[in-house]
Image: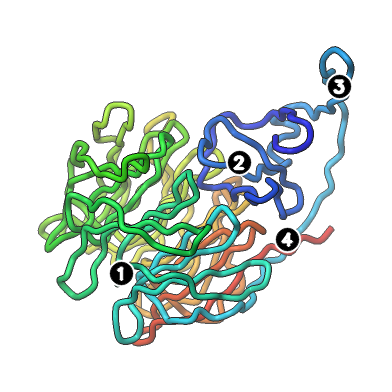
Amino acid sequence: MPGTIEAGICGFKHLACSGFVPCASSNNVCYEAGHICVHHPICHTHPICYPLSMAGEPFCPTITMTNTTTKPTLITTTTSATTTTSQPEWSVTGNMTNGRVWHTASVLLNGKVLVTGGFGNRSYLNSAELYDPSTGIWTTTGSMSNARSDHTASLLSNGKVLVSGGRYGNLDYLKSAELYDPSTGTWTTTGSMINERIWHIASVLSNGKVLVSGGSRNGALNSAELYDPSTGTWTTTSSMIDRRFGYTVSVLSNEKVLVTGGRSVGNIILNSVELYDPSTGIWTTTSNMTNARHFHTASVLLNGEVLVTGGWSASTGYSNSAELYDPSKDIWTTTSNMNIARGYHTASVLSNGKVLVTGGVNRNSDYANSAELYDPLTGTWTTISSMTDARYSHKASIVLNGKVLVTGGYNYPIALNSAELYELFHTN
């Protein structure tokens, strides 16, 4: 645990690092009440804000450390819990400089949010801007070398952001990549990918490399490649079994990479699932989802399971179904349906373990401003207050104060520049 005394806490050994907010890099603190900054053995890239509620009974005894001249003594104590209720709330924050859809949003180690590229109301964008959660203000930063949308952005362990691929025209696909340095606010080119691609997904592995897989280039791809930040170069790794875009990728607590669904050749919507093992570089099939879907979401829950929601298939149109994958058992089970069918939406794992789903397109092809929460403890969905703007293909980022920042997206024909914040206000 960062701080004046290096101490230990007990809690979950296996967890999904992507579901936790990083500690503030300047002083390794957590701004949300009830959280402490810890170096977890699974989360190699940066310290995380760990909920104290996951470090007490029944997870482990509460401990108090006392210093002696020989060695620390651990004393078991008894604590009582205070019951709290939570009221969800949305608030409008500062607008982005540009309206954007199919952009990226990355939470930097300094707590700011970097938004890059996308499509504006008239053109593809190379501009980038920064959101400061402490002020609610956006400021422009250095522009990328290439205008691009439908690209990826990955936060590296050194704090830089890798942007790769995308397009700058209807059929103008990119394989170029560039790096953003938050300390200077500038971009530099790095090695290009082997393949041009859009609608691909990039995943930062525990070894620091970036896995890029699938996507489209005049048709679905199954190729995959690895970026090494230490050399700035890309190398091929084994291809996925199925060609796919509009799929999801999740880095599991066992460090394997789970790929679900998507659209394949012949416009076939997939229910197939595969696993990538970084230690061998090999893809293997695993149990199929119950429902075929694409442009859905997948969220790694705090218990390590993966929640898949919504999306579109030829048989159902936009879906409200949800299902859970258990990596320890390699099985899928259905869970309760969302209240609204949706695709092109977002799903964010909150610090309390619940999943916030926002916006998207529904069965009537209407754009949604609705939001709902999934509770893994009960397997149920609860409708909460709606966003101010209906939007799809937007981005949702968990900022360091625990709030969820929603940016941009389409409310056709307008690419939105609006942004709003979701927060759980706690009352005793």
- Position of residue 60 measured from the top left corner of the image (x, y, whole percent): 72, 27
Query: In front of the other: label 2 or label 4?
Result: 2
- Position of residue 162 measured from the top left corner of the image (x, y, whole percent): 38, 54
Furthest-top residue in view? 70
Q: Which of marks 1 and 3 is nearer the N terminus?
A: 3
* Residue at image location 37% in from the left, 32% down from the top: 330
Residue 320: quarter of image: bottom left
Q: Which of marks 4 and 3 is nearer the N terminus?
A: 3
Residue 293 visible in the picture: no
Rounded to the nearest angstrom, the CA distance separating label 4 from label 1 is 37 Å
52 or 353: nearer the viewer: 52
- Position of residue 411 measured from the top left corner of the image (x, y, whole percent): 40, 82
What residue sits right under mark 3 in the picture? Answer: 75
Q: Earlier in the sequence, mark 2 or mark 4?
A: 2
Query: In front of the other: label 4 or label 3?
Result: 3
Query: In front of the other: label 3 or label 2?
Result: 2
Determine contact: label 1, label 3, CB under 8 Å.
no
Q: Which of marks 3 and 2 is nearer the N terminus?
A: 2
Disc 3 element: strand
Residue 192 visible in the picture: yes
Residue 373: quarter of image: bottom right
What residue sits right under mark 2 in the picture? Answer: 47
330 or 139: nearer the viewer: 139
Residue 173: quarter of image: bottom left
Furthest-front residue in view? 184
* Residue at image location 30% in from the left, 72% down from the top: 147
What amino acid is at disc 3? Ile
**Other-residue count near label 1 (Cα within 10 Å), few / some / many at <14 / 14–19 / ≥20:** many
